């Protein structure tokens, strides 16, 4: 039986179910307990699990991310919430130098079964420091796994798997999705990390995206359908590892591809996909692959600048028509 | 410099300034509800005494840096308030050309170094401003502000140590308003005397009443003088309170209405007004004139901001590099 729940409820359910299942799992972060989460994604968890397992912290990201890693080396399975991933930057040393490398450095003795989660990327007019998409930064780091759900169903299934995973996993959400509703089964389910999903089948052009910005791709696909152009939309869901197979298979079918990613353009997931596809599907390409990214600037505050900065559905439509040589 | 006398003129200046700051924030809040200001909006209501006392202790050449609760500090330093309002409304005429928004105000002309959105990020910067002044042999000192929540960041502790190690001309001021979002000070450490964090670094440190500028002023003046005399940094804990929620969407379940009311009894504007009335520094009519002036000035601010243009899409590239022909990647 499926029911409609909000993204934030799916997140809370995933964590709560895993905490019921395994005493070693605990949640730590700023405002996660008494305040019920800065974005209410941990609502009710303090009441159910108590202050030993749902832990409010001072504004000490470096400290509590490191405490999380240390506790994971000593048998626990922490979920560390960043109020947003923008603030993970003061803790990035703990994630990159400690969480990601410990297993290898210790010759396989110490694994780090930790989940870092919280919202990533822009969320309206918050200015440069609060609007950064860091998925590709973390995806660049061997030793980490990085998933980016775009709907409540994926959020729950991926987060549960992340918590059970024995390696460090980052689950990157969005403030702007927490209120989104979607169907989520009552029964338990898990979603494998590293598997993309074809959201919509089509034969004319492949649109690849992930995270909240995929909505621009959906909207573009609707627009294109009005002109009888059938777009296949792929939600990557995971950016480390990347499900290259699903992407390449789709490209072999449509022969044209547009990638939509909220990220700065120099060295991101889009460029990685393009590199992979030209190497593994060169003979199938009927047009150069296009990508729609953010502007190559920090995000600015004014509404006009936010719009100019972010990928927009119209740009996706235009790029799709371009790879189809329609314009 | 010896402590200055707090004259009638100073009290009247404090009154007018603080009233303007308060009304400015109230107006910003109203404009936020009308969706003319977006994003986050952190208001300074209740904390004005700290700023009034501080400004009386420094000179134009001195430097000022703070966190994101930063709309009225630049105004206090002399930035035209309509420029701050324009920034809040995302206009090209704003203090950062509409790039910065509510959390990121700056004014090089008025030695206001921001406006910083990452908690604690400005603390080492404050030490760095002072480092440059010492290096260059400038007489200037730096005031570096932060919230009670920010002292739990590693950046704070590293900056404290470096400032002592290198005897930097900086005063660190913790505006302890009781809360970091929904987290009270007592829930962030095993002691609540934040100023004592200075002891571990052997930095002169003290807690001060931040609600009454006449109490805050002499203490910060001493710290400023120490810095200017080349004797190094000071850590001050200004005990104050924020009347409003953390930002605009805060249900404030972590505190009681009574608690807020209790602090409002010691309102900085009220305290100064009482002195003015007790000492007959101004008649009721004169106070009314001040209020009218404040209201008119505020109206002009909003008008200026509303009549200003939004930046154009291409302005996004204007302020990223000094190099004007920087080769940006453009997709598609
Ligand atoms: C590194 C970092 N972590 C978290 C946040 C989110 N955040 C913004 S303000 C704030 C509370 C800060 O409280 P305090 O330092 O007491 O300043 P106040 O808001 O009371 O002025 C938090 C947690 C942030 N901006 N930066
Ligand atoms: Mg505070």
Image (cartoon, coloured by chain):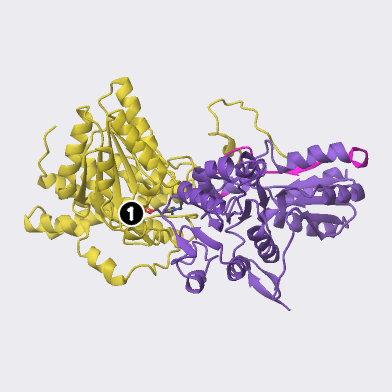
Quarter assignment of residue B114 = top left
**What is the x, y in percent for residue A156?**
66, 65
How dense is the environment of label 1, judged by Cα within 10 Å: few (below 14), some, or many (20 and up)? many
Whether residue A327 is visible: no
Q: Of all residues shown, which one is farthest toward the top?
A: B136
Residue denoted by label 1: B44
Answer with left or right where residue A151 lies relative to residue B32. right
Residue A254 vs residue A106, the one in the foreground: A106
For chain A, the rendered hue is purple
Residue at horizontal 11 percent and vertical 34 percent from the top: B2
**Chain depicted in yellow:** B
Residue A143 lies in the magenta-colored region: no
Residue at horizontal 22 percent and vertical 27 percent from the top: B230
**What is the x, y in percent for residue A173?**
61, 57
Residue at horizontal 20 percent and vertical 37 percent from the top: B223
Q: Quadrant of the C terminus of chain B?
A: top right
Residue B62 vs residue A315, the one in the foreground: B62
Label 1: chain? Answer: B
Quarter assignment of residue B33 = bottom left
Answer with left or right where residue A265 lies relative to residue A15. right
First to last magenta residue range: A281-303
For the stretch drawn in magenta, the main secondary structure is loop
Q: Dividing the image into four equal quarters, which quarter contains ligand 2? A: bottom left
Q: Quadrant of the N terminus of chain B?
A: top left
Whether residue B100 is visible: yes
């Amino acid at each position: 039986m499926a029911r409609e729940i909000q993204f934030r409820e799916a997140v809370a359910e995933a964590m709560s179910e895993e905490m019921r299942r395994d005493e070693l799992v605990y949640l730590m972060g700023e405002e996660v307990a008494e305040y019920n989460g800065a974005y209410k994604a941990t609502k009710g968890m303090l009441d159910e699990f108590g202050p030993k397992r749902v832990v409010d912290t001072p504004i000490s990201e470096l400290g509590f991310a490191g405490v999380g890693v240390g506790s994971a080396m000593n048998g626990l399975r922490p979920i560390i919430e960043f109020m947003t991933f923008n603030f993970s930057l003061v803790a990035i040393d703990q994630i990159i130098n400690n969480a990601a490398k410990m297993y290898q450095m210790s010759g396989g003795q110490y694994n780090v079964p930790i989940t870092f989660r919280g919202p990533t990327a822009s969320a309206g007019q918050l200015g440069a420091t609060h609007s950064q998409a860091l998925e590709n930064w973390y995806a660049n780091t061997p030793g980490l796994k990085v998933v980016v759900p775009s709907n409540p169903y994926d959020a729950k299934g991926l987060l549960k798997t992340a918590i059970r995973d024995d390696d460090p996993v980052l689950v990157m959400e969005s403030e702007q999705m927490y209120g989104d509703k979607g169907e989520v089964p009552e029964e338990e389910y898990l979603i494998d990390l590293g598997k993309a999903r074809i959201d919509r089948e089509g034969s004319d052009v492949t649109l690849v995206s992930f995270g909240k910005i995929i909505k621009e791709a959906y909207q573009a696909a609707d627009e294109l359908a009005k002109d009888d152009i059938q777009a296949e939309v792929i939600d990557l869901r995971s950016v480390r590892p990347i499900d290259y197979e699903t992407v390449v298979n789709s490209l072999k079918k449509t022969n044209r591809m547009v990638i939509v990613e909220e990220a700065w353009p120099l060295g991101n997931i889009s460029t990685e996909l393009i590199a992979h596809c030209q190497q593994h599907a060169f003979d199938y390409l009927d047009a150069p692959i296009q990508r729609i990214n953010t502007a190559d600037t920090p995000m600015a505050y004014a509404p006009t600048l936010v719009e100019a900065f972010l990928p927009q559905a119209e740009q996706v439509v235009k790029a799709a028509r371009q790879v189809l040589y329609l314009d | 410099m010896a402590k200055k006398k707090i004259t009638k003129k100073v009290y009247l200046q404090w009154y007018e300034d603080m009233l303007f700051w308060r009304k400015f924030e109230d107006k910003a809040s109203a404009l936020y509800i009308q969706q003319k200001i977006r994003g986050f909006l952190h208001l300074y209501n209740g904390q004005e005494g700290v700023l009034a006392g501080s400004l009386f202790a420094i000179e134009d050449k001195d430097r000022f840096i703070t966190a994101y609760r930063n709309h009225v500090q630049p105004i206090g330093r002399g930035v035209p308030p309509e420029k701050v309002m324009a920034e809040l409304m995302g206009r090209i005429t704003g203090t950062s050309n509409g790039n910065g928004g509510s959390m990121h105000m700056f004014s090089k002309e008025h030695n206001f170094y921001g406006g910083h959105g990452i908690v604690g990020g400005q603390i080492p910067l404050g030490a760095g401003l002072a480092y440059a002044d010492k290096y260059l042999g400038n007489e200037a000192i730096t005031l570096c502000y932060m919230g009670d929540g920010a002292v739990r960041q590693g950046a704070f502790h590293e900056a404290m140590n470096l400032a002592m190690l290198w005897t930097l001309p900086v005063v660190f001021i913790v505006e302890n308003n009781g809360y970091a979002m929904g987290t009270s000070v007592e829930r962030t450490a095993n002691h609540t005397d934040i100023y004592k964090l200075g002891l571990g670094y052997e930095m002169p440190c003290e807690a001060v009443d931040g609600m009454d500028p006449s109490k805050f002023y002499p203490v910060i003046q001493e710290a400023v003088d120490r810095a200017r005399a080349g004797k190094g940094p000071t850590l001050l804990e200004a005990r104050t309170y924020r009347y409003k929620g953390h930002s605009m969407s805060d249900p404030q379940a972590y505190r009681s209405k009574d608690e807020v009311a209790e602090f409002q009894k010691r309102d900085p504007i009220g305290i100064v007004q009482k002195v003015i009335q007790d000492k007959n520094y101004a008649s009721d009519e004169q106070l009314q004139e001040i209020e009218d002036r404040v209201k008119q000035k505020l109206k002009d601010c909003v008008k200026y901001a509303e009549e200003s243009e939004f930046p154009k899409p291409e302005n996004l590239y204007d302020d990223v590099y000094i190099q004007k022909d920087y080769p940006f990647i453009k997709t598609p």
